[in-house]
Image (cartoon, rainbow, N blue to C red):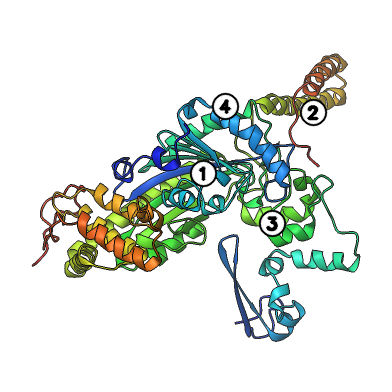
Amino acid sequence: MSSTIHDFLIPAGEAAKRSGPADKIVLSSRVRLARNLKQFPFPGTGKKSDRLKVLDVLRPAVEGLPQMAERFSDTLDNLTPMDKQILVERHLVSREHAAKGAGSGLVINREETLCVMINEEDHLRMQSLRPGLQLREAWRTLDNVDSALEGPLDFAFSFELGYLTACPTNLGTGIRVSAMLHLPALVLSEQINQIIQAVNKLGLAVRGLYGEGTEALGNVFQVSNQMTLGETESDIVERINKVLAQLIDHEENARASLLEKKPSMLFNHVGRAYGIVANAHCISSKETMNLLSLMRLGVDLGLFPGVQRSLVDELFVITQPAHLQLGLSEKLTAEERDLARADMLRERLKQVRRPAQSVSGGGSGGGGADKPSKT
Amino acid sequence: MLCNVCKENEATVHLTQMIEGKIKKVDLCEPCSKSKGVDDPTGFSLADLLLGLGAAQESQAATPGLELSCPQCGHTQADFKKSGRLGCPRCYEVFREGLEGLLKSMHKGTKHVGKVPLSLQENKTMKERLKALQGELEAAVCREDFESAATLRDKIKQTSDRLQSLPVAQPES
C-alpha cells in the first residue's frame, strides 16, 4: 500500500473495458455524499490545525471500511501536481480537491468504485462510481458506507435541515447524483440546447466533462440533481433515472433519424474525424476529444467493423495532458504534447481502417439503426 | 423590456452573472441600476439583488458593530455573502433567518425528509411519540377522562426520560 498512485490505478486500457448497462450512451454513474463532523468548523473556515485534526479522525475511519481493505490512501501534500492531474483526468477527484495540500486526504478502493475525499469543501466527500447506468447500485453502496461511518463518527445533523454542509446548496441529504452522457447525435442535430433547457427546468443541472463550470468537450455532458433538501435520496435517484431514460431515447432517436435523413452529413463528420485523428501530426487535447467523440459514434453505428468502443474510450483518457506526459521522462510543453499526442494517435489507430461508406449490420459497438443509407 | 426592480422604466442595463453555477440575468433601468450600485461592479453582487440580501446588509451597515457573527467559528454574514459558504455546523442556527428564503429558492422544500443517522432515529421516533401523547393527553383532559390522562402522563414521563438519555442532533432554534 506504499505504492504510488500510478502503480495503483487500473491501466487506462483495462479501465476502458469496464462495462455497464446502457454504456453506449451513459459513460458512468456517480453518487456523492457530503458529511461533516459536528465539532469542527468546515474546511474552508477552519485553521490548518483543525483540518489536520479532522484528517486524523477521518482517515483511519475510512481506511477501516471493509470496502477499503485494499486501497490507495494518501494526503494531498504527498501527491505531485502530475499525480493530481491524473486523478482529475480519471474523474476520481474534483478539480477543487486536486488544488488542496496538507490537511486534505484521499482514499480509493482497489476497484476504483469508491473514492473518498477528506477536507474538500466538506470534511467528507464520499463517491461511489459505476460504469454505465447504475445509479441505484451506486446509491446503495454509498448508503452502506455512510451507515458504517456514522457509527464511529459524529456527523453534523439537524432534524430540520438534515446533514449540515459548508454550502447551503448541498444541505439536507448532501447527495449529488450524476451521470456522464455521450450525446453526439443530439449535438449534431442541434437539439442539445433545447434538451439542456428542458432538463434544467426539471431542476437538474447539465454540465461539462469536468463538472461545474467546464465545457462540454467531446459531446460529454454531466447531468446531476441540484436540490438536496426536501426530497429523499431515493426520490432523487429515481427522478434522475427517469430523465436519463428519456435522454437515452432522445439520443437514440437522433442517431436513427440522422442515419435516415442526413446520412452523408453523419458519414462526413465521422469520416473527417477519423481522417484527422488517425493522420494528424499535431493535435490539441480539445480537438482530440471532439473528434474521438465522433469516432465513438461511428463505432456505435457499426462504421468501424472490428473496432471496440473501449479503444476509443481508452484514447479519450490517455490523450489528455497528464496521461500523455506519464511515462515520458522530460516535461513536455503544450506544443510538444500536441506532437506526442498525434504520434500516439497515429500509432494506436494504425490498424483501424477508414470508416465504412454505409451502415451494414451492427458493429462491435452494438450497432445503431440497421437501415442502409444511399451511397 | 421593463426594469426588473421598478417595473416602470425601460431597462437599459443588462447584467449576467454566474451564481452557484447557474446563469442569472437581470435587467435594470438607469435610476435603479444607480441606486443598487450596479455602476460599481466590484461592490455589486447579483445574488444580493436576486435574493434580497442587499437590503439586510444595508441596514447592518447603518449600525456597525452589530453584524451577526457565529459565536462558534466567528463567521460573519459578510463572510457568507462573499463566499456563499457557512463556517461551521452552528452557523446554520446563527444565520437561520437570512437562510430561510435562500433555501426556499434553491431546494424543493426547507425540511429534511431523507436519511437520518441510525443513532438519531430513536430520538426522532421518541420526539414524534411525545408529541402524539401530549395531544392525546390534552384531548383526555378536555373530555374529563382523568383515568386515561393519568396513564398518558406516565407514558409521557417515560418517553421524555428515554429521550433525555439519547444522543442529540444539532440543536434547533
Q: Residues under labels 3 and 2: Cα distance?
A: 33 Å
CB-based contact (under 8 Å), mark 3 and mark 4: no
Q: Secondary structure at mark 4?
A: helix
In the displayed structure, does residue A280 sit left or right of residue A373? right
Kind of element beneath mark 1: helix
Image check: B144 left or right of A198?
Answer: right
Report the Cα–Cα distance between label 4 and label 2: 37 Å
Chain hosting mark 3: B
Report, in whole angstroms, how far the alpha carbon at label 1 lies from the one at label 4: 22 Å
* Residue most extreme to the left: A375
Q: Secondary structure at mark 3?
A: helix
Residue type for callout 3: Leu
Mark 4 surroundings within 10 Å by alpha-carbon count, few (fewer than 14), some (14 through 19), many (20 or more): some
Please name the residue that numbered disc 1 is placed on: A236
Residue depicted at 10% across the width and 55% down the height: A360
Q: How many marks?
A: 4
Q: Residues at marks 1 and 4, common chain?
A: yes
Q: Quadrant of residue A135?
A: top left
Q: Chain of mark 1?
A: A
For the residues bearing labels 2 and 1, Cβ distance under 8 angstroms:
no
Which is nearer the N-term, disc 3 or disc 2?
3
Q: Is residue A247 left or right of residue A54?
A: left
Hey, what amino acid is under mark 2? Gly
Q: Chain of mark 4?
A: A
A313 vs B146: above or below: below
**Residue A88 in the image: x percent, y percent?**
46, 51
Q: Are marks 3 and 2 in contact (CB under 8 Å)?
A: no
The residue labelled by disc 2 is: B135
Marks 1 and 3 in Cβ contact (< 8 Å): no
Q: Residue at x 8, y 67 (%)?
A: A375
- The amino acid type found where label 4 is placed reads Ala
Q: Which mark is residue A148?
A: 4
